[in-house]
Image (cartoon, rainbow, N blue to C red):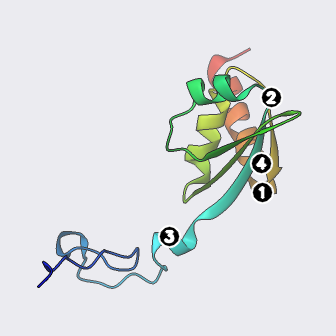
Amino acid sequence: MAPEHPRPLSCATRPWWSQSRRPSRRPPSCHARRRWRVLLKCDLARAAEELDSGIGLLEPLEEGVLLRTRTDSMGWFARQLVKLPFEFQVREPEALREEIRTCAERLLKWVGP
């Protein structure tokens, strides 16, 4: 008889230690994740060097490297892009462009005139 393996956890199944007493009205985070596509103006080696390996899929193109990823936090992802030492172009979503503009305005405010 084969050994019994535990059932893998789906994104909707939370372990006992992370369950709250009140049910959330939000869907599980894996369903709420947004899709992002950003063209990085560099080669694949440079993109891999600057980004964490778990940030998403890097696809080499003629004009650079396409970063495809999913995340729950637009602010977090915008900050990851802003710290890159090379140019990038947001392909989607439009809301990410606005978040990056907000980050840029905040930085300019902090450094003063």
Tags 1 and 2 touching, CB below 8 Å:
no
Residue placed most toward the observer, 106 or 48:
48
Q: Quadrant of the N terminus?
A: bottom left
Disc 2/disc 4 C-alpha distance (Å): 20 Å
Residue placed most toward the observer, 25 or 111:
25
Disc 1/disc 2 C-alpha distance (Å): 18 Å
Q: Earlier in the sequence, mark 4 or mark 1?
A: 1
Q: Quadrant of the C terminus?
A: top right
**Total marks placed:** 4
82 on left or right of 14: right
Q: Which mark is residue 98?
A: 4
53 on left or right of 86: left
Q: Which residue is mark 3?
A: 30
Q: Which mark is residue 41?
A: 2
Q: Residue at x 45, y 76 (%)?
A: 28
Tags 3 and 2 touching, CB below 8 Å:
no
Q: Earlier in the sequence, mark 2 or mark 4?
A: 2
Circle 2 — which element? loop
Q: In front of the other: label 3 or label 4?
A: 3
**Amino acid marked by disc 2:** Lys
Q: Earlier in the sequence, mark 3 or mark 2?
A: 3
**Amino acid marked by disc 3:** Cys
